[in-house]
Image (cartoon, grey):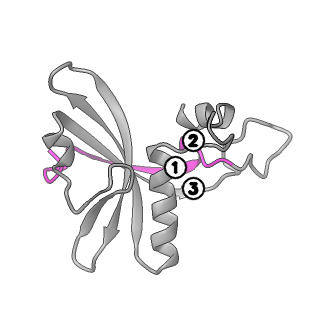
């Protein structure tokens, strides 16, 4: 949803496209990998305690040689997986996504090489981690 919204709704201020958590997570993952830091892209759902509303969010984790370290470029929060619980959320269910390829999903069937936007559907592998204790 966010990619489709971003694609069709450039910023009214400068006419450029803006990103949301999955774009920031993808950019962070690509940047840290380019620096030689093993990083994985994650997405999760969380339930707001006060309202019961469920929302989604995307982040990354970078490997420090011993453990995966929480990295959230959208919330500017690093090595603090409890930030979502502190913000009033619970039931944080995490999925690891990998093997992204822009040509895997495209809106234009006549353009099999991709549409230039990395979408949720472009990730071929998904590993459900569930409610990881360090986040809940």
Q: Residue furthest front?
A: 13
Q: Which secondary structure lies at badge 2?
A: helix
Q: Is residue 5 above or below residue 98?
A: above
Magenta segment: does it hold 129?
Answer: yes
Between 97 and 88, the one lying in front of the other is 88
Tag 3: Cα neighbours inside 10 Å, few (<14), some, or many (≥20)? some
**Residue at point 23%, 29% (across, down):** 47
Position of 84 with respect to 1 (left or right) is left
The disc at residue 121 is 2
Q: Is residue 4 above or below residue 32?
A: above
Residue 37 placement (x, y as % from top left): 41, 77
Whether residue 98 is visible, yes or no, is: no
Q: Residue furthest right?
A: 110
- The image quadrant of residue 69 is bottom left
**Residue at point 39%, 50% (across, down):** 74
Quadrant housing the C terminus: top left
**Residue at point 23%, 39% (across, down):** 92
> What is the spatial separation of the Cα atoms under label 2 and label 3, in whole angstroms?
9 Å
The disc at residue 100 is 3
Q: Is residue 103 above or below residue 79?
A: above
Position of 27 with respect to 54 (left or right) is right
Magenta segment: does it hold 130?
Answer: yes
> What is the spatial separation of the Cα atoms under label 3 and label 1, in whole angstroms?
13 Å
Circles 2 and 1 in contact, beta carbons < 8 Å? no
- Please state the extent of the stretch shown in magenta in the rendering: 117-136
Q: Which residue is mark 1?
A: 23
Q: Residue furthest top?
A: 51
Residue 80 placement (x, y as % from top left): 19, 57
Residue 95 placement (x, y as % from top left): 35, 47
């Amino acid at each position: 949803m966010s990619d489709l919204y971003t694609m069709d709704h450039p910023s009214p201020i400068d006419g450029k496209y803006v990103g949301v958590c999955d774009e920031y997570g993808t950019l962070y993952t690509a940047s840290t990998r380019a620096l030689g830091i093993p990083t994985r892209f994650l997405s999760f759902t969380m339930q707001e305690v006060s309202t019961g509303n469920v929302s989604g969010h995307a982040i990354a984790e970078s490997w420090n040689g011993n453990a995966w370290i929480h990295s959230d470029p959208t919330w500017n929060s690093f090595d603090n997986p409890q930030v979502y619980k502190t913000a009033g959320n619970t039931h944080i269910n995490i999925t690891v996504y990998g093997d992204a390829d822009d040509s895997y999903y495209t809106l234009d069937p006549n353009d099999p090489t991709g549409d230039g936007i990395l979408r949720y559907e472009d990730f071929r592998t998904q590993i459900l981690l569930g409610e990881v204790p360090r986040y809940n």
